[in-house]
Image: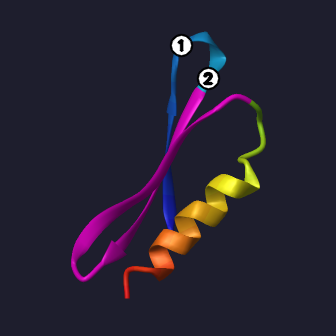
């Protein structure tokens, strides 16, 4: 699993979590971060969706 980070206005940051699956890139989850730490719940959602691709 990888993430792309993008700086937004007003000090916010967007994160998009994705993975490669059968020759394609699959978007797993996206968030707008309001604090420095990535919420555990966001990572859990991305991992659960990645595991469901099989």
User: Which quadrant of the rendered structure holds the C terminus?
Assistant: bottom left
Is disc 1 surrounded by few (<14), some (14 to 19) or many (20+) residues within 10 Å? few
For the stretch drawn in magenta, what is the main secondary structure? strand
Span of residues in magenta = 13-34
Labelled disc at residue 12 = 2
Residue 28 horizontal/vertical position (percent): 43, 60
Is disc 2 surrounded by few (<14), some (14 to 19) or many (20+) residues within 10 Å? few
Is residue 16 in sight in this rendering?
no
Labelled disc at residue 30 = none
Is residue 21 in the magenta section? Answer: yes
- Figure check: 16 above or below 7: below
* Side (left or right) of 23 relative to 37: left
Give the residue furthest to the top. Answer: 10
> Distance of mark 1 from mark 2, alpha carbons?
6 Å
Say which residue label 1 marks.
9
* Side (left or right) of 13 relative to 54: right
Is residue 54 in sight in this rendering?
yes
Is residue 29 in the magenta section? Answer: yes
- Figure check: 43 above or below 23: above
Give the residue furthest to the left. Answer: 23
Q: Quadrant of residue 22?
A: bottom left
* Side (left or right) of 47 relative to 28: right
Label 2 near label 1: C-beta < 8 Å?
yes
Q: Quadrant of residue 20?
A: bottom left
> Which residue occupies the foreground of this view, 39 or 1?
39
Identify which residue is drawn at 64% across, 17% down.
11
């Amino acid at each position: 699993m990888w993430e792309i980070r993008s700086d937004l206005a007003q000090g916010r940051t967007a994160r998009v979590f994705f993975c490669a699956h059968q020759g394609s890139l699959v978007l797993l989850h996206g968030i707008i971060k309001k604090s420095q730490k990535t919420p555990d719940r966001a990572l859990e959602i991305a991992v659960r969706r990645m595991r469901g691709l099989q």
